Image (cartoon, grey):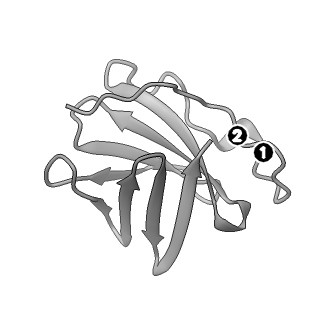
Amino acid sequence: MLFLTGCSNEPAKGTFDGHSDTRWLPEQAVTPTSVIATHTYTCNQNRIIAIQYLGDGLSLLLHTPRRQRATRLRAPRQGSSFYGSKTVLTLHGQSLVLREDGVLRRCERD
């Protein structure tokens, strides 16, 4: 089972690309019984994303400023990468690697 603490729904400070606007961040009320944590990450080039980890331990919702709806990613087993259409997300402690539409981004948890 995946357990996470230190939830944050605040964007990173000091961004200059306009993504500090909280309108794109995930809603706290998205099926509250299934969301176990929400974290924001700052990626290279100051791009901010948010991830909502779901209670099954094998699914998450990826929120990005460019998309109005979250992308659901699933892992085949615990400790594996999460996959979606044209998207792969791999967690490494407090950081992650996101490959989306052929673009690779390294992100650190805020």
Residue at x 49% of width, y 22% of height: 29
Which quadrant: the N terminus? top left
Contact, CB < 8 Å: mark 2 with mark 1? yes
Residue at x 22% of width, y 56% of height: 80
Residue 38 or residue 21, whichever sits in front: 38
Residue 91 location (% of width, % of height): 38, 53
Residue 81 location (% of width, % of height): 27, 59
Element type at mark 1: loop
93 up-or-down from 45: above or below = above
- Quadrant in which residue 87 is drawn: bottom left
Residue at x 56% of width, y 36% of height: 26
Residue at x 48% of width, y 46% of height: 94
Which residue position is annotated with label 1?
Answer: 20
Residue at the front extreme of this rendering:
93
Q: Relative to 110, is 15 on the left or the right?
A: right
Q: Relative to 110, is 95 on the left or the right?
A: left
Element type at mark 2: loop
47 up-or-down from 3: above or below = below
Q: Which amino acid does label 2 sit on?
A: Pro
Between marks 2 and 1, how big is the CA–CA gap? 6 Å
- Answer with mark 2 or mark 1, whichever residue precedes in sequence: 2
Residue 105 or residue 59, whichever sits in front: 105
Which residue position is annotated with label 2?
Answer: 11
Q: Relative to 63, is 82 on the left or the right?
A: left
